[in-house]
């Protein structure tokens, strides 16, 4: 088990955003969390990543309690690719990747990782000297993913990676997640785009106003009439 969350509660002031959530990710798995706007998906990922403090509950990573500071969580091997990409707009593609690798000790390793990112996203190699703010939305998403990979995570947290991307590009980027997973990286992905997320993942949780209302193998959820109606636009 790479991640095990038990009875997690998180508040934003008076708002109870995560309510007694239980969730786990096994080593090598791709797990999805689907849910509408405001369901608490971002809060959940930010709490795991150490960007938001939990109120109570337990988060175990490889059997041990997670540190609460975000840079320590990153050092442990958990990287977050945040919602809305948030690349450093005034830096080049290469410089953004450097920022992602700042915890790596040896330059030799670092250049190897940059090459691995370029191999995964040849477009980033073509654009390596371009200022990030001038990249297309899809390229910025590739860069945000590449930057997170620079820390060589064991667990990759993805917040709404399909947001604002054309359908073809969503497919292309989701195919990269399969490649990343095949390199041995476990993935926890949060998505409003339930169809893509369920097709990518092996298991999924449905979050509604802070509660897990359903969980199971993704293929079962894809065929669940209630999920189809509420999240997949079918009646
Ligand atoms: P979205 O897809 O719109 O990002 P989400 O599922 O990620 O939604 P969260 O952003 O985690 O949901 O929000 C969960 C709840 O917590 C919402 O009611 C939201 O208004 C509230 N919330 C989130 N961030 C804050 C904050 N910084 N201060 C106060 N309330 C917040």
Image (spheres, rainbow, N blue to C red):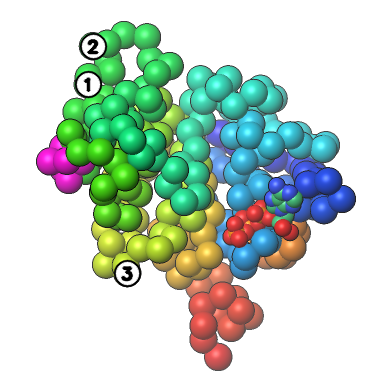
User: Left of 207 or right of it: where is 32?
Assistant: left
The one nearer the camera, 204 or 80, is: 80
Quarter of the image that includes the C terminus: bottom right
Contact, mark 1 vs mark 2 (Cβ under 8 Å)? yes
Q: State the image quarter where residue 45 is shown.
A: top right
The one nearer the camera, 197 or 62, is: 197
User: Left of 194 or right of it: where is 145?
Assistant: left
User: Left of 42 or right of it: where is 130?
Assistant: left
Residue 114 at what x, y percent from top left? 24, 27
Q: State the image quarter where residue 214 is shown.
A: bottom right
Q: Which residues are magenta?
A: 122-127
> Which element carries disc 2, helix, strand or loop?
helix
Q: Where is ligand 1, by quadrant?
A: bottom right
Task: Kindly identify the residue that appears in the image at 25 percent across and 38 percent down.
Answer: 131
Task: Kindly identify the residue that appears in the image at 62 percent across and 67 percent down.
Answer: 36
Residue 177 seen anywhere in this rendered image of the structure: yes
Task: Kindly identify the residue that appears in the image at 55 percent across and 80 percent down.
Answer: 228
The one nearer the camera, 162 or 179, is: 162
Label 2, residues with CA under 10 Å away: few <14, some 14-19, many ≥20: few
Q: Which residue is mark 1?
A: 112
| Mark 2 C-beta closer than 8 Å to ligand 1 | no
Residue 226 at what x, y percent from top left? 63, 80
> Which element carries disc 3, helix, strand or loop?
helix
Label 3, residues with CA under 10 Å away: few <14, some 14-19, many ≥20: few
Q: Which residue is mark 2?
A: 108
Task: Kindly identify the residue that appears in the image at 68 percent across and 61 percent down.
Answer: 39
Quarter of the image that includes the N terminus: top right
- Mark 3 or mark 1, which has the lower sequence index? 1
The CA span between labels 3 and 1 is: 31 Å
Q: Which residue is mark 3?
A: 167
Contact, mark 2 vs mark 3 (Cβ under 8 Å)? no
* Magenta stretch contains residue 62: no
């Amino acid at each position: 088990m790479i991640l095990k969350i038990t009875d997690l509660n998180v508040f934003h002031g008076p708002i109870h955003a995560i309510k007694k959530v239980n969730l786990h990710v096994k080593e090598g798995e791709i797990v999805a969390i689907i849910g509408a706007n405001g369901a608490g998906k971002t809060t959940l990922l930010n709490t795991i990543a150490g960007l938001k403090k939990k109120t109570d509950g337990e988060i175990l990573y490889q059997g041990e309690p997670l540190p609460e500071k975000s840079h320590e969580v990153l050092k442990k091997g958990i990287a977050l690719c945040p919602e809305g990409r948030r690349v450093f707009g005034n830096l080049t593609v290469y410089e953004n990747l450097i920022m992602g690798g700042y915890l790596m000790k040896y330059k030799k390793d670092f250049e190897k990782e940059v090459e691995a990112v370029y191999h995964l996203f040849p477009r980033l190699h073509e654009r390596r000297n371009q200022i990030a703010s001038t990249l297309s939305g899809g390229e910025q998403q590739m860069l945000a993913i590449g930057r997170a990979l620079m820390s060589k995570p064991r667990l990759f947290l993805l917040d709404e990676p399909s947001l604002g991307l054309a359908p073809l590009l969503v497919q292309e980027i989701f195919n990269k997640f399969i490649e990343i997973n095949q390199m041995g990286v476990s993935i926890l992905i949060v998505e409003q785009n339930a169809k893509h997320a369920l097709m990518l993942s092996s298991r999924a949780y449905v979050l509604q106003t802070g509660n897990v209302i359903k969980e199971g193998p993704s293929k079962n959820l894809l065929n669940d009439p209630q999920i189809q109606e509420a999240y997949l636009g079918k009646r």
